[in-house]
Image (cartoon, helix red, strand yellow):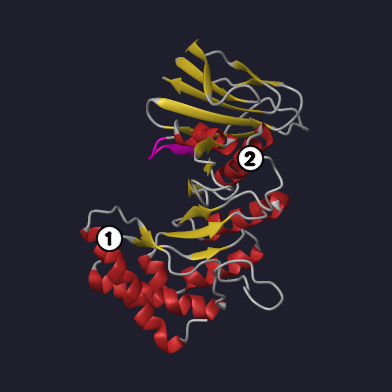
Amino acid sequence: NLPKENYRAFVDYVLTIADWFVEQGYPIYAISPINEPQWSWGGDWVGQEGCHYEIDETIEVLELFATEMQKRNSPYKLSGPESGEMTWGHYQYVERFFGSEILNNFCDSFAGHSYWMDTKSEEKEQVGKKIRETYPDKKYEMSEWCELPLTIDSRCIDSGLHMAQVIVDDLTKMNAVSWQSWTAVNGDGLLDRVNGELVTYNRYYAFKHFTSFIETGMTRVRIFDNFREETKLKTVAFTDENTTVIVIVNPEKNGEALKLDGLLGNSEIYLTDETHNCEKIYDGKFESTIEIPAKSIVTVKVEM
């Protein structure tokens, strides 16, 4: 691991490079100096790049970054602690992150990853609730995810449905204000280059249901619905003064009718399923009853 005597040199190295890119006109948003500190990339299993940091070490490094970035008046944020999953173990890192006076004053958000959380949905909800109650003025940024262990065919609807369900969970249970795929062009990303051809994966269209309609600055609102108690539908909604956007994910083999009251205006409906790729299937007066096809993602955009 990085020796403690080199921490300050590492800070200067990273910030000097970032400053150079800013001078060239690149839109640097944040500095993220540590990746998934709780994992141990050694012993019998070495799977990828990474560097384990105990919690004390994580905070020490990030505090040095925050202090130096303040001195330099850096035009970007500090991103951390970048834990690999939203479990109670991750909460310990968040607790110490904002327990630091330096980091609490310097950072208005924290970052983490959503790996493996499709099987830990209840724990994610518990952790998200705890974070919202304890740090109501701080924002969560979901900064990395891909489908692991890569068992779903990237070109089929199941791949997009899986990703869309994770996104909805992160937006609702963790109250995420942003969401990022680990890679854009890669076998586990949204696109890939195969034999010289650019291939669009189903995950790309799933992601589009959110990114093409939910605008920066929109507020997430709760949906009061007529769901059956056993329904598997996942929903999330955002609104501003003029527009409401609702994303509905149906992973089931049967379709379902959803009734949404309280909205007036013109609506557009977009569909991804086995034969549609985020295609507009309706444009007209808002109808409160919406048919959600089997194994599909539906986005409803209502202009009020």
Residue that extends furthest to the front in the rendered view of this protein: 195
* 159 w.r.t. 287: above or below: below
Which residue in the protein does label 2 denote? 154
Number of other residues with Cα within 10 Å of mark 1, as a class: few under 14, some 14 to 19, many 20 or more: few
Question: Which of the two discs, 1 and 2, labels the residue nearer the N terminus?
Answer: 1
Residue that extends furthest to the bottom in the rendered view of this protein: 5
Q: Position of residue 106 (x, y in %)?
A: 36, 67
* 240 w.r.t. 70: above or below: above
Which residue in the protein does label 1 denote? 21
Number of other residues with Cα within 10 Å of mark 2, as a class: few under 14, some 14 to 19, many 20 or more: many
At 57% from the left and 43% from the top, the residue drawn is 167
65 relative position to 2: left or right: left
Quick one: SS at disc 2?
A: loop
Residue that extends furthest to the top in the rendered view of this protein: 285
Most common secondary structure along the magenta stretch: loop
Q: Which residues are magenta?
A: 215-220
At 62% from the left and 60% from the top, the residue drawn is 85
108 relative position to 39: left or right: left
Could you tell me how far apart the alpha carbons at marks 1 and 2 are, in whole angstroms? Answer: 34 Å
* 243 w.r.t. 125: above or below: above
Under mark 2, the amino acid is: Ser
Q: Position of residue 109 (x, y in %)?
A: 43, 58
* 187 w.r.t. 127: above or below: above
Q: Nearer the viewer, residue 73 or 186?
A: 186
Whether pointer 1 and pointer 2 mark residues with C-beta atoms closer than 8 Å, the reply is no
Quick one: SS at disc 1?
A: helix
- Is residue 216 rendered magenta in the image? yes
Q: Position of residue 91 (x, y in %)?
A: 59, 65
- Is residue 244 rendered magenta in the image? no
